[in-house]
Image (cartoon, rainbow, N blue to C red):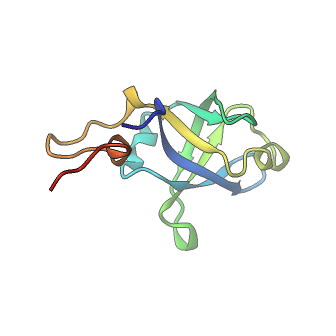
Amino acid sequence: MSNSPYTAIARLLRPQGRKGELLADLLTDFPERFETTSSVLLENAAGEPTPATVEGHWFPVGRNAGRVVLKLSGIDSINDAETLQGKLVLVPDTERVALAEDRVWIADLIGCELYH
């Protein structure tokens, strides 16, 4: 099993617009989770999770389709957003989307022994 108690749901790429929004790669098969997720964690400089609040989100079309744009509380400028480039957006494993009975999280398989 994975040693981390967190699951990455997005990676922040770069500022999007002038008001601190961030374009992010989705790392989840459940992008609709952003409809109900307002509390997330971001890696700090030491790689440890720190709380952040999602004020809003939208899914772009065109060349950035398949990604998400996030507006985080307290990130109000391009300069603010640039400090978060490359950071992972995390949720506690206890808040992962429930999977069907015959499905497992890949992270839960890491370190397992397989027999055939």
Q: Is residue 17 above or below residue 77?
A: below
Q: Quadrant of residue 55?
A: top right
**Is residue 43 toward the left or the right of residue 78 in the image?**
left
Which of these two is toward me, 112 or 102?
A: 112
Q: Quadrant of the C terminus?
A: bottom left
**Is residue 101 toward the left or the right of residue 35 in the image?**
left
Residue at 53% over, 37% down: 90
* Callout count: 0
Residue at 53% over, 48% down: 10
Which of these two is toward me, 44 or 38?
A: 44
Which x, y percent locates residue 61?
52, 67
Name the residue at the right extreme: 79
Q: Is residue 21 above or below residue 93?
A: below
Residue at 37% over, 45% down: 110
Q: Quadrant of residue 80?
A: top right
Which x, y percent locates residue 95?
39, 29
Which x, y percent locates residue 24?
59, 54
Name the residue at the bottom extreme: 63
**Is residue 107 toward the left or the right of residue 62 in the image?**
left
Which of these two is toward me, 90 or 3?
A: 3
Residue at 21% over, 46% down: 103
**Is residue 35 toward the left or the right of residue 106 in the image?**
right
Which x, y percent locates residue 16?
70, 56
Q: Quadrant of residue 88?
A: top right
Q: Quadrant of the N terminus?
A: top left
